[in-house]
Amino acid sequence: MFKPISLYIGLRYTRARRSNHFISFIALVSMIGLTLGVAVLITVLSVMNGFDRELKNRVLGMVPQATVSSTQILTDWPVLAKKIEQHEHVAGVAPFTQLQGMLTAQGTVAGIMVTGIEPKYEKNVSIIQQHMVEGSIDKLQKGEYGIVLGKQMTDGLGLRLNDSVTLVLPEATPSPAGVVPRFKRFKIVGIFSIGAEVDSSLGYIALNDASTLLRLPDGAQGIRMKLDDIFLAPQISNEIVRDLNQSGRGNFYASDWTYTHGNLFSAIQMEKTMVALLLVLIVIVAAFNIVSSLVMVVTDKKADIAILRTLGASPKTITQIFMVQGTVIGVVGTIMGTILGITLALTVSDLVGWVSTAFGLHLFDAYFINYLPSYLKWQDVVKIVVLSLGLSFIATIYPAYRAAKIQPAEALRYE
């Protein structure tokens, strides 16, 4: 005889074709519900992880993670940058000067945030060099008035590499013809593509050219930092500013990514938590459908249970038989859901991208990136599998306990 007997009979009940087709249907629905719940939970969490990763790697790879600025132009910024870089959590530093304006070309106008940079330093704090599709930031040299733009910006203005574009500054200049805005002609020396909103909103010029446009002495408005832990940005930047102000070097103030993109990151985290909670509830409902399925099986198998009891089966054995049957439903549903979820998580980006292109849909215009990211974390998969199996096992306890309480004489009275 196959041992243990409870496992043998439990698997036999699972494989057997039941005379009550409604019970079979409920068991099948429970398994399918668990499969879909697990698959959707894995897929959606992977997409939320993808948005989280893209925010950290792309957007925060371009915009400053933390900055130290002064109310005065920093003409000695190399000395200040070297001092800031000595902080244990600072991985790189670069000077910057920012100005806002509008780009105009071929009758088209677009707003832009222009940053004056030193290419040698900028490579230490930004991912722009790794995402250049044409040209290079090394061509940003003092007095040559070159500019590096995002691909979305150049496509929108109908421009290519080495074309000219006019930067319009908001500062008005008196002239014989009246007050007119300031203009400056730039040559496009590089085009980058990050695949995020920064492609259409950021531009880079040489640091000294930015000072010239703003009619300021050669120098920088502040120092941009790359940190080894972006979540420590407020603490680190404030700590550095406090030390600099105490040293009497000037009047400094700090800023970090939580001011510019903190709301977006918090929204993604909250969205991820709420969506995960809702999907976990779906898995819970699917798992506890096993309860109704097993309760009906117990009712249908009362005579079999009574016979097993008269043959010497203990209440513990009866309990184990039905726990095996319910657990099999949970294990099969979880395995199928995990396979489906992993497959979808690995292919959903391409699938949604194809649907968007094929039907001319603009599904991601409201987001900070222009595609659907997906990042599968295996620790999430393990947690979901453990949760699903645990809920499935818990769902078998009550029906199995109810089966063990059946009295043989009472069950066989009307047989």
Image (cartoon, rainbow, N blue to C red):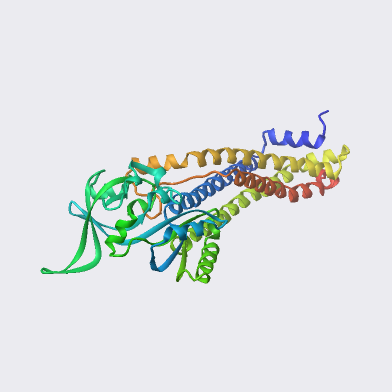
Where does residue 260 sit, x and y in percent of width and height? 43, 62
Left or right of residue 16: residue 348: left
On the rendered image, what quadrant is the N terminus found in?
A: top right
Left or right of residue 305: residue 96: left
Residue at 34% across / 43% down in the picture? 136
Where does residue 61 sit, x and y in percent of width and height? 45, 51
Left or right of residue 243: residue 112: left
Q: Residue reaching furthest top? A: 1
Where does residue 240 sit, x and y in percent of width and height? 52, 64
Residue at 11% across / 68% down in the picture? 177
Determine the image quadrant of residue 325: top right
On the rendered image, what quadrant is the C terminus found in?
A: top right
Res. 74 in view = yes
In this rendering, is residue 91 above or below 382? below
In this rendering, is residue 181 above or below 82? below
Res. 415 in view = no
Q: Residue reaching furthest left? A: 176
Asked whether 314 or 49 is in front, the reply is: 49
Asked whether 179 or 283 is in front, the reply is: 179
Give the total number of marks visible in the rendering: 0
Where does residue 187 sit, x and y in percent of width and height? 24, 49
Asked whether 185 or 260 is in front, the reply is: 185
Left or right of residue 210: residue 10: right
